Image: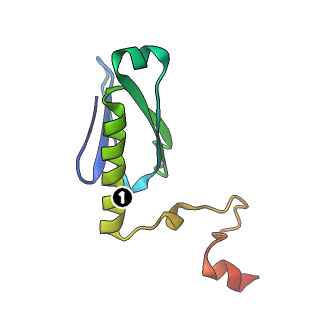
């Protein structure tokens, strides 16, 4: 089961053993939509979410009715939350050299 409010996305899974996760919307980096043949027949889709969250890096919200509209609504909420918290996309960019500096940061340029 999936739900969201103005700040968080909630993911609840399981029947006997229930697991509940949440992710802050501002941590969502990318949303994409995919639909296989069966999903298209039944008007469903899967929203693929990439995030900077430590426990929920990449996950799928599967078999959603009106998935395109749901993805757009979630995307809009993500952007609104980033603006509200004054978070820009560059805060999520990491340097894969693991030298402790973001390749886009001014401090990194000063160290050169």
Identify which residue is drawn at 52% across, 61% down: 92
Pick whichever, 6 or 21, lies toward us: 6
List x then y, in percent, for residue 11: 33, 35
List x then y, in percent, for residue 35: 46, 25
* 71 is higher (above) or lower (below) than 16: below
94 relative position to 46: left or right: right
- Is any atom of residue 74 visible in this view? yes
Identify which residue is drawn at 34% across, 67% down: 83
List x then y, in percent, for residue 90: 53, 66
Q: Quadrant of residue 47?
A: top left
Pointer 1: residues within 10 angstroms few (<14), some, or many (20+)?
some
Task: Label 1, secondary structure: give it.
Answer: helix
- Residue furthest to the bottom in view is 110
* 106 is higher (above) or lower (below) than 35: below
Identify which residue is drawn at 76% across, 82% down: 112
**Chosen colour scheme:** rainbow
* 46 is higher (above) or lower (below) than 57: above
Q: Quadrant of residue 80?
A: bottom left
- Is any atom of residue 19 visible in this view? no
Pick whichever, 19 or 111, lies toward us: 111
What residue does disc 1 label?
Answer: 79
């Amino acid at each position: 089961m999936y739900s969201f409010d103005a700040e968080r996305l909630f993911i609840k899974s399981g029947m006997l053993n229930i697991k509940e996760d949440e992710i802050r919307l501002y941590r969502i980096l990318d949303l994409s939509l995919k639909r296989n043949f069966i999903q298209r027949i039944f008007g469903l889709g899967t929203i693929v979410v990439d995030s900077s969250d430590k426990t929920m890096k990449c996950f799928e919200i599967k078999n959603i009715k009106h998935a395109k509209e749901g993805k757009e609504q979630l995307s809009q909420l993500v952007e609104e939350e980033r603006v509200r918290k004054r978070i820009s996309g560059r805060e999520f960019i990491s340097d894969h050299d693991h030298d402790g500096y973001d390749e886009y940061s001014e401090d990194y340029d000063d160290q050169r």
